[in-house]
Image (cartoon, rainbow, N blue to C red):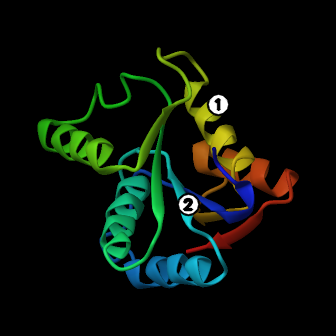
């Protein structure tokens, strides 16, 4: 069972700039760990989610943290290329837990996954650069629900 008080979620864009600063992200993850967070929810999309998962795997080697893959549907990787699918499967296999918020794709299943992640946490670390799309909606939902938000 997920304890929202010690759970942190991530949300960010699929496309990251080539000069994306992972150091700031890493600092926010370590700040969260130092603040008592031990469970991290990743939405398993390309881009920011993948980067967060990989960073958490590195940190998990020395810190006692749990990585939960939050998957919106069982066909999430349908349009990934072969290398992306291979990495996606590897990450699912190394996650401490995998939660499917829906078995099948439907219009809005990503939003359901995002709201599940916010509802299950008390902190959101996000990478948000524009006022539209899934990350913007997730941050707005977190703000409405008074979840602590940190921006990378």
Residue 142: percent from left, percent from top: 76, 53
Q: Count neighbours of disc 1 (C-alpha within 10 A) and say few if under 14, some if 14 to 19, many if 20 or more.
A: some
**What residue is rendered at 66% in x and 81% in y?**
35
Lateral position of residue 16 relative to residue 132, left or right: left
**What residue is rendered at 69% in x and 40% in y?**
115
Q: Tell me if I can see residue 21 in this picture.
A: no
Element marked by disc 2: strand
Q: Count neighbours of disc 2 (C-alpha within 10 A) and say few if under 14, some if 14 to 19, many if 20 or more.
A: many
Residue 113: percent from left, percent from top: 59, 35
**Label 1, label 2: how many angstroms apart (C-alpha)?**
20 Å
> Which disc is residue 89 wearing?
none
Residue 57: percent from left, percent from top: 33, 65
Q: Which of 12 and 2 is in front in this view?
A: 2
Element marked by disc 1: helix
Looking at the picture, does residue 47 appear above or below residue 69?
A: below
**What residue is rendered at 61% in x and 24% in y?**
108
**What residue is rendered at 13% in x and 36% in y?**
82
- Looking at marks 1 and 2 on the same chain, the residue that comes earlier in the sequence is marked by 2
Which residue is under mark 2? 39
Looking at the picture, does residue 129 appear above or below residue 71?
A: below
Q: In which quarter of the image is the C terminus?
A: bottom right
Residue 61: percent from left, percent from top: 31, 74
Which residue is under mark 1? 112
Q: Which of 124 and 66 is in front in this view?
A: 66
Q: Which of 61 and 103 is in front in this view?
A: 61
């Amino acid at each position: 069972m997920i304890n929202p008080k010690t759970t942190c979620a991530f949300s960010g864009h699929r496309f990251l700039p080539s000069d994306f600063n992972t150091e700031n992200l890493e600092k926010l993850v370590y700040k969260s760990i130092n603040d008592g967070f031990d469970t991290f929810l990743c939405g398993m999309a390309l881009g920011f989610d993948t980067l967060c998962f990989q960073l958490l795997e590195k940190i998990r080697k020395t810190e006692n943290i749990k990585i939960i893959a939050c998957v919106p549907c069982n066909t999430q990787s349908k349009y990934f290329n072969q290398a992306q699918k291979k990495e996606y499967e590897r990450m699912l296999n190394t996650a401490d837990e995998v939660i499917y918020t829906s078995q099948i794709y439907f219009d809005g299943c990503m939003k359901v996954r995002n709201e599940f992640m916010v509802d299950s946490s008390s902190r959101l670390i996000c990478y948000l650069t524009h006022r539209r799309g899934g990350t913007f909606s997730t941050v707005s939902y977190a703000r409405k629900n008074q979840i602590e938000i940190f921006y990378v």
